[in-house]
Amino acid sequence: MAETVRILLVGDVMTGRGIDQILPNPCPPELHERWIGSAEDYVRLAERANGPIPRRAGFDYPWGEALPAWREVTPDLAIANLETAVTRSDAWLDKGINYRMSPENVGCLEAAGFDACALANNHVLDWGRQGLVDTLEALARAGIGTAGAGADRAAARAPAILAAKAGPRVLLVSCVVADSGVPQSWAAREHRSGVNLVTLADQTVDAIARDLAAVRRPADIAVVSIHWGSNWGYGIEPAQRSFAQNLIRRAGVSIVHGHSSHHPKGVEVFDARLILYGCGDLLNDYEGISGYAAYRGDLVAAYLAEVCAADGRLAALRILPFRVRRLRLERPSESDVNWLAARLNREGAELGTRFAASGSKALYLERDQRQAAPNHRM
């Protein structure tokens, strides 16, 4: 067995709407938004900002320079939060913004190499419960594991069991908190499909611990992917921090994979386990939209966590930065990477973490922090 497992984690992957329109088999472009009536308008906004974008592009186009970067670091598993329905359903819900991508474009997710997608978020049911059925079926046909949504409460809560290329299995639990914008009516029930909607209560930690114990083998590594909080802002609520730490302390979780913020947030190492409070978006169609410029939403990140196979401790963490331009991931400039490092270090001061930049290619969690001793609170 390998000594470590290398897990690539990314935040929100929003391949619907404008991204879907540039792929080979898009959905009809009509939208039900107050200000924009066509998904093509999002493509045109991006073109106005940075230049022409091909239509009917290959499935690998949106990932751009991320693909060779990911091949270089050779992850054993790749996990994303998929924040779109994969459906041609017309049963849209009146919630202001509705993301969908065509099932015939699921090859885009395959091209990225995702092994599993967390689905407990505030967009997976944008096109109704039939849209959720279509999403689950499309991902299953593509061989991509799912967690966090299903035909009933048990299915939505069940951990996905993922076989890494090397080392132990990885168990993925996906859940969502109402403050991220998910309607209460989306919660999965005993005889109703939906998402794994939770509160940040001790009882939720206990329930996750039981769900993991039901399938867990001694060497398994547990990841909890959680969609929580607002889209903008660096603040971390005390309840979020306590919940994440309790998942590690009481449920034996090795990685808390947080997302919902449109930009990367602070990182913590607690008892030598990793907490990503907000991974930020990885891919979206917001290019050319004004507002929130101070957060640099065009700068995105993928997180490569190297976890000890023997005990689930964090051995190393590398952040791979990219920039979204022409609806495609490209390498950022060195100054962009330094900007991102400064923000993460500013937010990490209270959390006890600091990153060092290596040119334009990566940020590294400093050694003394990623190898923190057990029971040491960072």
Image (spheres, helix red, strand yellow):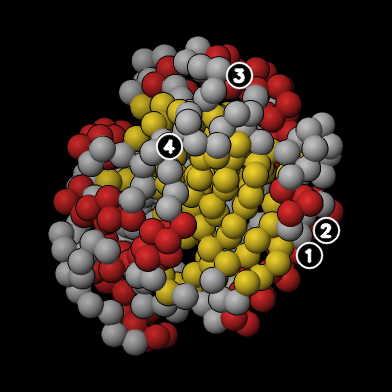
Residue wearing tag 3: 209
Please tell me which residue is depicted at 61% across the width and 19% down the height of the picture: 209
- Rate crowding at label 1 as few (under 14), some (14 to 19) or many (20 or more) other CA atoms within 10 Å: some
User: Which comes sooner in the sequence, label 4 or label 1?
Assistant: 4
Name the quarter where the C terminus is drawn: top right
Q: Which mark is residue 166?
A: 4
Real-space CA distance between mark 3 and mark 4, rounded to the nearest whole angstrom: 25 Å
* Quarter of the figure with residue 309: top right
Q: Is residue 186 above or below residue 97?
A: above
Residue 21 location (% of width, % of height): 24, 66
- In-image side of 11 versus 62 (left or right): right
Real-space Cα distance between discs 3 and 2? 30 Å
Marks 1/3: CA–CA distance: 33 Å
* Label pair 3/2, CB-CB below 8 angstroms: no
How much space separates mark 4 and mark 1, taking CA atoms?
35 Å
Which residue in the protein does label 1 denote? Answer: 346
First in sequence: mark 1 vs mark 3? 3
Q: Amino acid at mark 2?
A: Ala
Quadrant assignment, res 97: bottom left
Dot 3, crowdedness within 10 Å: few (<14), some or many (≥20)?
Answer: some
Mark 3 belongs to which amino acid? Ala
